[in-house]
Image (cartoon, rainbow, N blue to C red):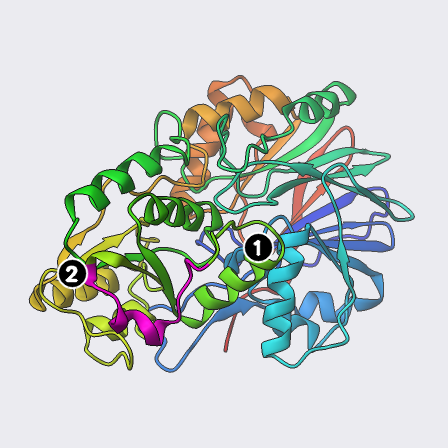
Amino acid sequence: MRLFRKNTNKIKVMALGGLNEIGKNMTVIEYKDEIIVIDAGMSFPDDEMLGVDVVIPDISYLIKNKDKIKGIFITHGHEDHIGALPYILKKINIPIYGAKLSIGLIQVKLKEHKINNAKLNVVSPRDIIKLSHMEVEFIKNNHSIPDACSIAVHTDQGIIYHTGDFKIDLTPIDGEVMDIHRICELSKKGVLLLLAESTNAEQPGSTMSEKTVGAGLDDLFRKASNSRIIVATFASNIHRLQQIINTAEKFNRKVAVSGRSMVNVVAVATELGYLNIPDNMLIDLNDISKYEDNEVVLITTGSQGEPMSALARMASAEHKKVEIKRGDLIIISAHPIPGNEKLISKVINSLFEKGAEVVYDESDIHVSGHAKQEELKLMHRLVRPKFFMPAHGEYRMLKIHAELAEELGMPSQNIFVNKTGDVLEIDRNSAKVTGTIPTGNVLV
């Protein structure tokens, strides 16, 4: 392992996770005697990781430098951005900054882990946290969860702009549009480094608006007028949950939820005002047998085929409260995360064997929360950075994103397709990978 040379006028940018992989997103920015961390995510174990529940980043570098750390700044409340927090906070008690919903979801996680001394700080878009050598600004963007933000780190060397996960949705469900105006203002000041997510960098075109899913759900509910309907989606995709609830209301169906994370998210999002459920519409899972099949919708976890999820337990007849029967319509409103295809296929086959109709992998029941190529190009044009480091994606995604930046005119020597642990040293005139820090997977 090469050690980087000490240069206090250089900003160091290092990923502890999220490069050459999906999930486990965590970026460290160090300047002079201060460190900030952007996100602290987990990922799911591979098939061969028997007995492993979650995978989190190796934070030995942070433990070694804990006195320099000023905070963890959260872009949004998905597991691949907040899932490692309970494990990190057990080792280092660092202040956490995030928008209201992100902090609400973090509180639920910390309560499960019996952590009650965390320093949680709620911020709003355009809020700036001032440190000695850096200022951290939250900027509204759009993703598949409310309160998603980009983060701009202001230094005397220039601005580092981290997109977080985003899509450019001009008709978002909550009406809260990305703050393009603020991005343009930062661009005029001069952005030194852009870190932009690469999840959909292979996909041409633009990601459809979340609103398009509503029409697809309406159509399926209409056709299944006599069936019980079960919808599996990500618990944290609150915009999707709202659309399912809206469609259920339209067709006079009650809603029940299954899966611990789904129950928790629905409770938090409703309490904080991010989810609007009409009075008397939500019913207890124990009461679904009191209603006719055409009077109920069940929203459940398990869209990725996770073995212990509610949908997987229904498929294997191990769920204590829900038994799949002939005629059920099951809608899987999510695309497979790379690596989960086998798990999902197994669950779908089992559901078909039980006589259910399963709708999956259809564009009108799921749209991505991640930007495709045309949106990525637009982000580059808006930000106009001097240097670029693609983030959040497997190697091919990072490489294709780098090629997009070159097509837009950025010199190849200003683009850094880094690995987890690479140390990018940067100032207003130059950028160079100078060494590595210890990184890897911690299996929980």
Against 34, is 267 above or below? below
Q: Is residue 440 left or right of residue 284?
A: right
Q: Which residue is label 1 attached to? A: 77
Up-down relation of residue 421 to residue 432 (above or below): below
Q: Helix, strand or loop at disc 2?
A: loop
Checking the image for residue 328, the label placed there is 2
| 383 sits left or right of 351 in the view | right
Q: Residue at x 24, y 72 (%)?
A: 314
Between discs 2 and 1, the one toward the N terminus? 1
**26 vs 372: above or below:** below
**Amino acid of disc 1:** Gly
Answer left or right for 145 relative to 355: right
Most distant residue in the right direction: 132
| Crowding near the residue tagged with mark 2, few <14, some 14–19, many ≥20 C-alpha atoms within 10 Å | many
403 or 106, nearer to the observer: 106
Magenta residues?
280-293
Residue at x-position 79% and y-position 41%: 127
Q: Is residue 22 magenta?
A: no
| Residue 250 spot, x, y in % from top left | 33, 43
* Residue 411 visible, this orientation: no
